[in-house]
Amino acid sequence: MQARILFEAAGPLTTIQDRGRTGAMRFGVPPSGPVDRLAFAAALTATGAADGWAFELSHGGCLITCHEGAIGFALCGGGFLADIDGDEPTAWRAGTLHTGQRLRIRAGSGNWAYLAFAGQHAAPRWLGSSATHASSGLGGGLIEAGSAYAFDAPRALEPRTLAPPPPSGPPDSLAVVLGPQDRHFPADAVRQLEQVRFTATSRFDRMGRVLGGPPLVPTSISMPSEPALRGCLQADGDGGLTVLLADHQTTSGYPKIATLIGPDVDRLAQMPAGHTFRFDLIDPHEALRRSRTAAAANAAWLRSLTAPRRLDERLWSSNLVDGVIDANGA
Amino acid sequence: MSAVSVRPIGESAVLIDFGGEISTATNERVVALDRALAGQPPQGMIETVPAYVSLMIVFDPLQTECDRIAAHALALLESAKIATRPPREHVIPVRYDAASAPDLETVAKATGLTPDEVVAQHLAGEYRVFMYGFAPGYAYLGGVPPALHLPRKPRAQRGHPAGSVIIAGAQCLITSLPMPTGWWVIGHTAQVILDPARAQPFLFDPGDVIRFERER
């Protein structure tokens, strides 16, 4: 059995993403993968495809028609809204799309959402991963109007609304560790980083997000290029800050004053444009503690999203436990 | 030789910084440490990224931490067993005709050389792959002869095909994808340096040596 879907419309920055590739940064290839790793994991968990891939959507949303079969889906992240044939638009929605039905997805308060399907489709892979590097198109691929996908072994999912991850709402502070090139900034810049509120602007893509705030002008930008990591706060020659995201350049000659801890990179990427926040400067040991605490909390939350088993599976397991129901009535 | 610095990058990577200016000697230490780590990876290491004078080690913060990774790397450095190996050499054929080298005339005017002299200078350079960056397969080659050192163009230009041989300052690069560039396009090679379909899509390793050969 197969289910076939067609993108009738897709906003810019619609891509296929898996969890990302490792080992190729040395050749200029960043990890790519989802900008919001937690929402991505939620969509996969809710569709029972933990090692699979999902469509990453941004502000343009998308419109999908199911042309054959029926297939379960989950939409997670950014408060994006899904409706089926014009029913009540709902965020964090799981359900089943049937032949002839249209799934419309529109942006919510955040910037990124993940749409996973409960079926099998071998997306194109590059260097061991289907994560799409958006500017080259290498990997799973860029989605546009007319893109069509066939899924094998599609499964239906019970309609439900998933619980978004705690804590709700965009954060007021984000944790950063100084460096690796804070020595290329005057002491006053470090003080400002800690004391001034910054703004998440509307200028972003998969490579990075520009921040609004006071210029943190480096003392020099003549350093030899050094490796860069997702989460680095990079200053250009005029002191403008950009946070590096999933498709970041792997090396850069602009100094990085500080680096966000992993979970907070994704929260910054999802902030609505205009949202202000401050940076919380912590040492690497505290950063490790917070990152591990967040990972444990996220894992617990993800377990709570596991797709409920189908009714017949539940009855079968209760038969095994109770041992009293005999289908033949003997 | 300057002292090695350890710089944490968030909670999931560390930069081993050899310091100083760009030099072959320092980059040889970077490449040697990179190779030593590949041979004896610490638990939890995900990947390494060599650059001009520094090496980033990315790790899984749920399995290990910065101090342990840095200690492992410094111990490898201390053991002084990380010998530099003779570099692998690549010969790359380049066409310098007008269609392949749109900026050759301008570079000649700016350097006070004839176009043929620019080509001769470019061919005379000894090039080393210092690092990758900017885009997949963009290998930064140091070793452009001083006579050809020029600042980059005021703004990037589009429309140059993959395989363009471009220079700026002491650096040379062969483009792997059609990306905008502010560097000077002085040639073109038919050699595919990034072939996504190959099992190993990249032609060069950091530390490799490249020689250009004129193709007519």
Image: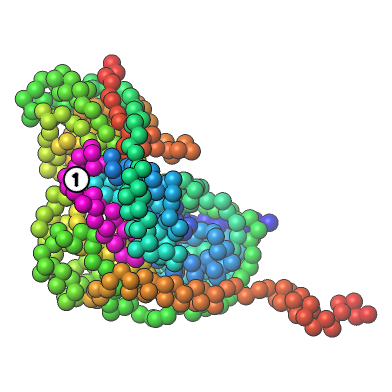
Above-or-below relation of A291 to B3: below
Residue type at mark 1? Met
Residue A265 can be seen, yes or no: no
**On the image, numbered disc 1 is attached to which residue?**
B1
- Residue located farthest toward the left when viewing the structure as drawn: B112
Quarter holding residue A312: bottom right
Magenta range is B1-27
A263 falls in the magenta region: no
* Relative image position of residue B158 (x, y in whole percent): 24, 40
Q: Residue at image x 52%, y 56%? A: A6
Residue B190 can be seen, yes or no: yes
- Residue located farthest toward the right when viewing the structure as drawn: A330
* Relative image position of residue A86 (x, y in whole percent): 49, 72
| Quadrant where the image shows the N terminus of chain B | top left
Q: Residue at image x 9%, y 22%? A: B113
Quarter holding residue A177: bottom left
Chain letter of disc 1 in the image: B
Name the residue nearer the viewer: B97 or A159: B97
Name the residue nearer the viewer: B127 or A48: B127
Dot 1: few (<14), some (14–19), or many (≥20) neighbours within 10 Å?
few
- Residue located farthest toward the top when viewing the structure as drawn: B216
Q: Residue at image x 49%, y 70%? A: A42
Above-or-below relation of B28 to A166: above
* Relative image position of residue A37 (x, y in whole percent): 42, 65
**Going by the image, does A46 lie left or right of A247?**
right
Quarter holding residue A209: bottom left
Name the residue nearer the viewer: A267 or A134: A267
**Going by the image, does B35 lie left or right of B24?**
right
Q: Residue at image x 42%, y 72%? A: A292
* Relative image position of residue A159 (x, y in whole percent): 58, 75
Secondary structure at numbered mark 1: loop
| Quadrant where the image shows the C terminus of chain B | top left
